[in-house]
Amino acid sequence: MVRIADPQALADAAVELLGNADKWHAASRAAIARVEAYYAQEAMFGRYRYLYYKSFAWQELASN
């Protein structure tokens, strides 16, 4: 993890990852797990359904 808007820290972290196979594989596994947990198709559809429901529910209440 690096601070936002710190290009030097990002570059340093990238070089460190590229030079350390164990850290690279661990970061890769963590990234894949994050994508599968938060961006899987069903999870995304569920979040969009919730947002649509929440967005339109207030309109229904306001019109009654």
Image (cartoon, helix red, strand yellow):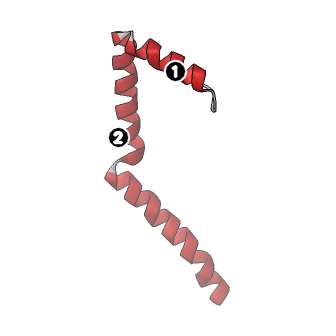
Q: Residue at x 61, y 81 (%)?
A: 59
Q: Name the residue carrying label 1.
A: 11
2 vs 1, front mark: 1
Indicate the quadrant containing the N terminus: top left, top right, bottom left or bottom right: top right
- What is the quadrant of residue 36 in the picture? top left
Whether the residues at callouts 2 and 1 have beta carbons within 8 Å, the answer is no
Whole-number angstrom distance, CA of label 2 to CA of label 1:
26 Å
- Compare marks 2 and 1 and give the one earlier in the sequence: 1
Q: Out of 45 and 18, give the one closest to the viewer.
A: 18
User: In the rendered image of this protein, does residue 18 appear above or below residue 62?
Assistant: above
Q: Is residue 13 left or right of residue 28?
A: right
Q: Position of residue 19 (x, y in %)?
A: 39, 10
Q: Is residue 24 visible?
A: yes
How packed is label 1: few (under 14 Cα within 10 Å), some, or many (20 or more)? few
Q: Amino acid at mark 1?
A: Ala
Q: Is residue 1 visible?
A: no
Q: Is residue 37 left or right of residue 4?
A: left
Q: Residue at x 46, y 58 (%)?
A: 47
User: In the rendered image of this protein, does residue 58 appear above or below residue 47?
Assistant: below
Q: Is residue 34 left or right of residue 61?
A: left
Q: Out of 9 and 22, give the one closest to the viewer.
A: 9
> Does dot 2 land on a helix, a strand or a loop?
helix
Q: Position of residue 30 (x, y in %)?
A: 40, 27
> Does dot 1 land on a helix, a strand or a loop?
helix
Q: Name the residue carrying label 2.
A: 36
